[in-house]
Image (cartoon, rainbow, N blue to C red):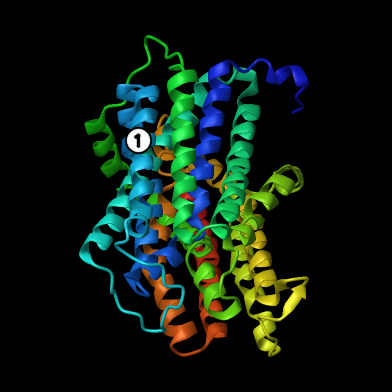
Amino acid sequence: MSFSTSSFREFPRVFWTANLTELFERAAYYAMASFLVLYLQQIGLGNYWPSTLNGLLWGLVYFLPILSGSLADHFGFRRALVLAFVLLTIGYAFAGAPVWTGLAELNPSIAKDAPLSASMPVVALAAAALVFIGVGGSIIKPCISGTVQKTSPAQLVTLGFGIFYMIINIGSLFGRGVSYYVRTNSNLSMIFAVSGAMALLAMFAVLFTYEEPPTPADAPKKDLKKTLLNMVLVLRQTRFVVFLVLMAGFAFLYHQVYNVIPLYLARFVEEKPPVELYTMANPVTIVLFQLLITRLFGGMNPIRSIIVGTLIIAGAMVFNILPLLKGMDLRAAFIGSLPLGGAMAIATVAMIAFGELFEAPRLYEFIGKLAPKGQEGLYMGYANLPMAIGSVVGGPVGAYIFNDVMVAQNRPVLGWLILAGIGVAAAAGIFVYAIWLNRFQDQ
């Protein structure tokens, strides 16, 4: 399908406003995401709680849209978005408050067995911050995607969501870039000031430019009680639940980009790694190769594409092993001032993005095929559940692999092999599932 320049003029103003809002929101989130586990460590939350709390944050962001979407439909997208950005602004302020108020000091030197040493006010502020950010972020997802769906002309829905996905990655790059500049000219806590400022900009964009998208008079509003009931009914479908659990393996590894990789860089590669710059490889890869991968492999069977994506993300872990097997110095310069370990991290993140390109769009397509006729929308609401499961599990398990295997045993190769093995196991599970599903459908 081809689009002309005039196609872009067919989108109404609210479509572009919603995308501008999404740009600022994603900039806010990714301004701090790459450093969150390191920051929580440095304010005294020990070696294990930072990863666990980071996993819970991602779990909230990806699980709660199932419920918050119903509330947004009931109260209106505009009101829901304003509430979301108020919660996000408070959350980012709470996150930076321990350092800004003097309750905690940043300690970049973390012992191998550092215990939880933060005071109760610091722990309370950190926990409250992540809850506010998680709840606020979960409200935004269904509002913005719903606006894109409602305001895209019928013949341009594909283009509309293509623009939306592109804006997400532009926002991600923008947030990381601004965060790097501010952090390197002040201190690590200021990443939350960047995030808070971006959230405020998004809120002002909603207040002054966003208009409630039109809703057909006969369109039924989602009912929260019915949503909860449907959740139970859907989760009684064994073949669907098994698929979601298996897909959590992909999400588990994806989450380690913001969990194990920052910790690994800080421990084994360099004292103050520019993690936000290294993780830029994810949105850059997606922006550059999305159309090419779709064109070359769009005809591949969905389940096969998902398996390929999962194997790619498993293989991405191996990049970090290669220099270790040859006894190379991870801190040695690779290109200019870029250390070898940093180059391997960039390659890992880029490969994970390639895996995402094979997996993410086909996930929705496959879920649509699994759904009973007339229940496609209901089942699609659970497309983010694997990411929620993978994040919640990935936090503490990733912390164990890093702290108890890579650091305590001084066996980073084994740690990366375990992560790669989880990816291979997930791909094998999906392969076996596909065989079982074919037999199930033939009966």
Q: Position of residue 123 (x, y in %)?
A: 26, 62
**Residue 261 is at least partly visible in this image:** yes
Q: Is residue 441 above or below residue 55?
A: above
Compared to residue 363, the image places residue 422 above or below, namely below
Given the current orientation, which residue lies at the most extreme top position? Answer: 217
Percent position (x, y) of residue 127? 28, 56
> Visible in this render: residue 373?
no
Looking at the rendered structure, the kind of residue marked 1 is: Val
| Residue 221: % across, % down | 32, 21
Q: Within 10 angstroms of label 1, few (less than 14), some, or many (20 or more) residues? A: some
Residue at 32 percent of width and 61 percent of height: 102
- The vertical placement of 2 against 44, above or below, is above
| Image side of residue 83 versus residue 30, left or right | left
Q: How many labels does the image show?
A: 1
- When the figure is inspected, residue 51 is found, relative to residue 181, above or below; the finding is below
**In the visual, does 230 lie left or right of 297?**
left
Residue 422 in percent (x, y) is at 50, 71
Quarter containing the N terminus: top right
What residue is pinned by disc 1?
Answer: 86
Quarter-of-image position of residue 55: bottom left
As drawn, is 119 to the left or to the right of 80? left
The one nearer the camera, 378 or 73, is: 73
Q: Nearer the viewer, residue 416 or 210?
A: 210
Q: Is mark 1 on a helix, strand or loop?
A: helix
Q: Residue at x 71, y 19 (%)?
A: 7
Residue found at x 41% / y 82%: 111
